[in-house]
Image: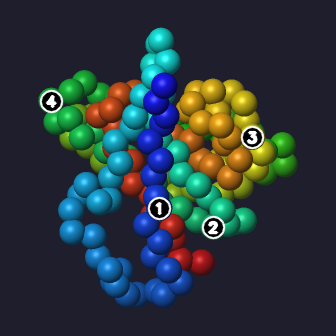
Amino acid sequence: MANFAKVTPINLGDDRNKFLSDGLALASEVFTACASNGAGTPKYGAYFEMTERDDKYLIIVKNANASSAAKDVTIKAGGNKIFGSGNDLKLDDLAAGDINFVKIDSGRFKCTENVPALATLANISSTKGCVVIEGESTDIQVAVIKMPA
């Protein structure tokens, strides 16, 4: 069985007003396509590990298939009883070829403990320390940027 795709955030470091010192050459180095969890009725998605306590992240989602139908993207609520909202953040109908951005605070979407329903969805052993993003198909690509503190 497959897993959701693991995304490695691009870390901009603590410096401000500077270009990334080791720039990325290709879009394929920035974006990761959602992957199927391999279930009988598959779900598609990606996740990234958020080891910091309260950092800010920019998530970029793209419907990479310029001729496909619009697709939905959902950032799953982290399940934290104190900081979590309990509500997923959903973008309906990302048009073919379009890109959208969302800046998140870690407390709302970071899983501070394993959330079995999310782990089953993503087909990973534990969601602790992760943010889970569900896309409607492999047409959805995700990039994550860790913002300076």
| Snapshot quadrant of residue 121 | top right
Q: Is residue 134 left or right of residue 136?
A: right
Alpha carbons under labels 3 and 2: distance apart: 20 Å
CB under 8 Å between callouts 1 and 2?
no
Of the two numbered discs 1 and 2 on the same chain, state the one appearing first in sequence: 1
Alpha carbons under labels 4 and 3: distance apart: 37 Å
Label 1, secondary structure: give it. Answer: loop
* Residue drawn at x 71%, y 47% as measured from the top left: 128
- Can the viewer see residue 101? no
CB under 8 Å between callouts 3 and 1?
no
Residue under label 4: 67
Q: Nearer the viewer, residue 3 or 107?
A: 3
Alpha carbons under labels 1 and 4: distance apart: 28 Å
Of the two numbered discs 1 and 4 on the same chain, state the one appearing first in sequence: 1
* Image: 134 above or below 108: above
Residue under label 2: 55
Q: Position of residue 36 (x, y in %)?
A: 42, 28
Of the two numbered discs 3 and 1 on the same chain, state the one appearing first in sequence: 1
Residue under label 1: 9
Give amino acid for label 4.
Ser
